[in-house]
Image (cartoon, rainbow, N blue to C red):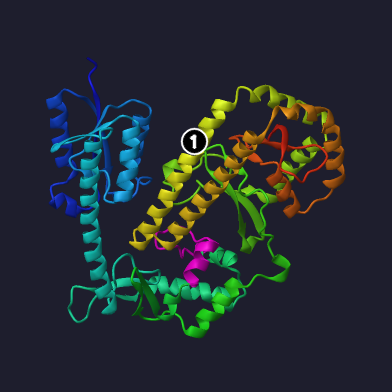
Amino acid sequence: MTQPTAALYVRVSTRHQAEEGFSLANQQDALTALAQERGWSFRLYVDAGVSGERIDNRPALLDLLNATANGELDVVAVVDESRLARDELTAAVIRDKLKKAGITLVTPSGDRDLSDPSGSFVATVLGAAAALEQDLRTAKMTAGLKATAKAGFWPGGPAPFGYQLAADPKGSKHKILSINESEASVIHQAVSLILDHGHSTWTATKVLNATGNHTRSGKPWYFRNLAHQLNKPSLTGRFTYQHPSGPIPIQIPAILTESRCQAVQAVIRAVPGDQTINKFYPLTGYLKCACGGSISGVSRKDRDTRYYKCSRTSAPIPTDQRCPHYPRQLPADQLETQVWDAIHDLLTNPDRLRQAAQRHIAASTHAAPQKANQRATVAYRLDELDLEEVGVIRAHARDHITNTQLATTLDRISDERTTLRGHLNQLDLWDQQSWANQANLDQLQHLAQDAETRLKDPTAQEQRRIYELLQLGITIAADRSLDIAGSLPSHGTLDPPETSGQLSTKVPQDP
């Protein structure tokens, strides 16, 4: 009989868990002894210092789930169900993945055959108990933070830039905020550069960096970070603690006067008339990076520039998992021109349209199983995104992530959801096709003539409408070449969404 392969999963998030007997060493020793007793070969998966409320921030768990999906494991062992997840929704997602992979969940207190209703029930009850314990712990902690903030003390976390934590002069165990004179001088210098010397945030960062006035971490300023710091109401002594039950104001020392702060924030918000940026990005929702991330439009006010940027180039994606391709940003005007020229050339060339339609019809008889698999995969990923969205909102409500991290993650989820739903639309259109499309091959000349007439100098909004009709999908390869795919509209008009073939073209990298 083949020796079972077990995954020994250990996780710890705080020192309090170590006090409960859940230290990494204790978990590892207990599971190793269990594996040796049962004669398993085993792999150790360790997530140190991470919360059990999410999946995507646990690299070891992600590796474990990939291994189970690939059929590399037979058993997953944990010292307690709470090590898999402290949140019942997250635990349910993990148990479902293990169940589908035919995995037995093992703890020192007993085995859980997740394919058996009784085993699944026990695992669910124990997972719910772990979630209840975490909810009680969280409720107690948030109640304490609320009381601390209402008393005027600092509720926890790092002090805002310009401030530092100080002991309560009355001798309590709590902390208060005092002004950090070194950081406050940087704020005063930045405000003076903008209000008194006519600098933008972009050029002000150049001066600050050149004079050695860096951020708290010692890194250079960039314009967005400086603008973020100068837009904080805490600079005038108003800080609001965002507690789940409602905002709690805390009085702190002021660094800037009210009038000075309002003046600099007005300058930051103002966009000169001759530098208005076109924020419309016709390709957002249609671009996919070679790394798997979605690519969306971004703008930089101070430099009057537009770019497309991969969603995997910044936080909360870990540094070692970020997109390795391209510069950080792709010039929007260049990319939009490149894509439109390729689409225009294809739609106005009857020979290329006919070839594309013939390839599609020839391949469609073999595509049905693949299409069904794609639909299931897309539907499953959409469900995962829903769970991920709930998880990140819960994490933000519990102050585990910042407002910026929440916004970035929700934007990434929204972009990916848009792309997936676009793909589902393509699959729906494919399902509606019939072999009558063969008759349209001889009519593609009319489509090309119609396109030549109607596609002259379209606006960016009109281009996006055409991309929508084509159900366009564009993958940017590592060498920045474009792989463009979509559905050809029926002959005679560009308005209806019916298709007569599959659009596919490759655009090499610009020299």
In this view of the protein, which residue sits in the foreground, 425 or 86? 425
In this view of the protein, which residue sits in the foreground, 14 or 6? 6
Q: Is residue 32 above or below residue 237?
A: above
x, y percentage for residue 511? 71, 36
How many numbered discs?
Answer: 1
x, y percentage for residue 316? 43, 51
Q: Residues within 10 Å of mark 1 (few under 14, many from 20)?
A: few
In this view of the protein, which residue sits in the foreground, 428 or 384? 428
Q: Is residue 358 above or below residue 400?
A: above
Q: Residue at x 22, y 53 (%)?
A: 14
Q: Can residue 210 be found in the magenta stretch?
A: yes
Q: Is residue 430 above or below residue 387?
A: above
Q: Which residues are magenta?
A: 209-231
Q: Is residue 456 above or below residue 183?
A: above
Q: Residue at x 27, y 67 (%)?
A: 142
Q: Which residue is mark 1?
A: 376
Q: Can residue 227 be found in the magenta stretch?
A: yes
Residue 483 seen by the camera: no
| Secondary-structure class at tag 1 | helix
